[in-house]
Amino acid sequence: MNKPFLIGVDLGGTNLKTALLDLDGKILEKIVVNTGKGKDIVLKQIVDVIENLLNKTGKKKSEITGIGIGTPGLVDSEKGIIRGLTNIKGFENVHMKEYVESTLDIPTSVDNDVNVMAYGELKCGAGKNAINIVCLTLGTGVGGGIIIDGKIYRGSSLSAGEIGHIPVNVDGPKCICGGRACLESYIGRDRIIKRTVEKLTHEKESIIPKLVGGDLKKVTPKVVYEAAAMGDMLAIEIWKETAQYLATALAGIINVLNPELIVIGGGVANAGKYLFDPLRNMTKERIFPFLAEKIQIVHAQLGEEAGIIGSAMMAKDSIIASSKSF
Amino acid sequence: MNKPFLIGVDLGGTNLKTALLDLDGKILEKIVVNTGKGKDIVLKQIVDVIENLLNKTGKKKSEITGIGIGTPGLVDSEKGIIRGLTNIKGFENVHMKEYVESTLDIPTSVDNDVNVMAYGELKCGAGKNAINIVCLTLGTGVGGGIIIDGKIYRGSSLSAGEIGHIPVNVDGPKCICGGRACLESYIGRDRIIKRTVEKLTHEKESIIPKLVGGDLKKVTPKVVYEAAAMGDMLAIEIWKETAQYLATALAGIINVLNPELIVIGGGVANAGKYLFDPLRNMTKERIFPFLAEKIQIVHAQLGEEAGIIGSAMMAKDSIIASSKSF
């Protein structure tokens, strides 16, 4: 018989979110703390928060099927090693799975945050009835996770899914990845802000300067969304442009991978219909007509809790699968 | 015990190639005839040629594990139905598998020609030790086949792999697929010719007009290759441009799918180093550095026989797998 509970951990640069869930991915209790500074502090913090969660809910370790940990950066999910994590100092080649398992004696899985989000949407969110899904997160960067045949597709060196680094032009701006004209270099958070500020120098009719009290350093995608919702034409145009870059990349993904579902999350996706309406139209214009009839492009459903739910569900499935193989 | 022979059929618009092979994909005897005109003629032709092949080699039907048929166009490989075939009149929704099996009483599989080529390269060609491979054919169009985990990846509506229809620019020429700025609309055979002829109107130094006796309607990719081999700068530049468009699409494929191998075949790929040298350099400049160290971009090995060998190997594996499931 399976143990009735899971623990999901969403390790971000700002917050460390931890929750107790049932085996269906329902959150029963959640603890959110600020992520500490430095590797050793964070490792201890994760273990402490999990123990607090067990005490608070009166659960025993023997009732937990597994712990799932999702984190940004490069993760070797087979070995449970975090290869690199830009937002937390010293997080290089950290044997996270080994550390947590040896300290708490509960089976643990570790994966990249976008893979985890994709898996959460597959099991408990927008992708419940799909088998081939491509997930994107739009934020500071553009992340991606690919589900093929109901499983995370990881590629030959465990680095598949880098949708932010699909070139959308033959030539274009240099990208932080070393490439050129990558999707992320047009629609990453800072590029949306930059395009907005540049447009504002030519176009004086926008409400955006008023919304930021005249300080254009305060422009954010949220402000551009709010302006669009007020009918601001410049803001609406920024979202259309963003949709056009994204549609270019999605058209390639859909024609090549032929998934039935595209799920888009992350803060920038909160622009809602100002992004999604032109995105759906522009993408469908660029793919095979018979695919345009079938493809669904939807907003992620799990929002802020995708990391917790996804990592817990991934822990459940990977741990149950590996225990069966013994 | 497996029956010791396979039959591979490569049904093209011009030629119908059929061969007897051993279970390792070695061709033992081959018959090539001109493809007939019209659906009924072609169906009868396929069966007749297979019977001729059996007579010629003295083999019995009971010695054949299976027949594999590869064909361009849209194929429902699960049901063995050819949905559409542009080069042969009346080839719509043809139940090829059913027809051949009921006529010859030998298990038959049918698949798209680029999937078949990819499978041939996986089993007997450039991809023998790989598990995640992306194959391209460069010809009139740009075709693609994707191998994931050692199996053809077909997607949710059996149409995955349309690499020719990855957009390589946000804006650009209208494509026959209905999309815009697709790879094929820059590097399909006719577009290579068109770019060459356009360049010749500005640049008078080229040897190409001499190679075609002054008649620019006779320019082909082969002529552009021959000119490049003679050191013609305009021709070399055409291959560099072609490489740049292709590198843009490949960079996206590699960053997203993280295969270990890219295999490129088709007539246009015969440009050899004039295409492959700039292609390898430009692709590696645009992908993550750790992937650039690992990815192999190679010329297909099976050439003209990829269709025969690939379809035979696919028949073998799919028929053995399905007989095991009984």
Image (cartoon, coloured by chain):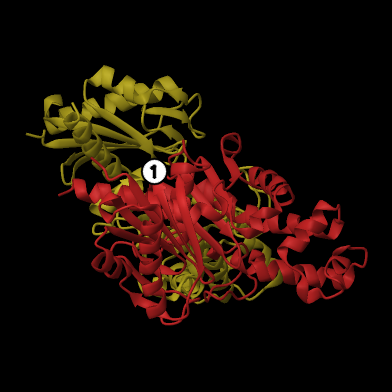
Chain colours: A red, B yellow
Position above or below: A158 against B22: below
Q: Residue at x 60, y 73 (%)?
A: B206
Q: Residue at x 24, y 62 (%)?
A: A105
Quadrant in which the N terminus of chain A is drawn: top left
Relative to B147, is B30 on the left or the right? left
Residue under label 1, please give it. Answer: A150
The location of residue B276, given as percent across then percent down, is 43, 68
Q: Secondary structure at mark 1?
A: loop
Q: Is residue A78 left or right of residue A163?
A: left
The image position of residue A289, as x and y in percent, is 61, 37
Residue at left 34%, top 65%?
A157
Q: Is residue B314 visible?
A: yes
Looking at the rendering, which quadrant does residue B95 occupy?
top left
Q: Nearer the viewer, residue B292 or B218?
A: B292
Inspect the image, locate mark 1, and give the three-letter code of the amino acid beneath it.
Gly
Would residue B144 be seen by someone viewing this image from the given angle? no
| Image height of B88 relative to B210, above or below | above
Tell me the subunit letter for badge 1: A
Q: State the image coordinates of residue A252 (x, y, percent, origin top left).
A: 55, 52
Residue at position x 56%, y 35% from top?
A294
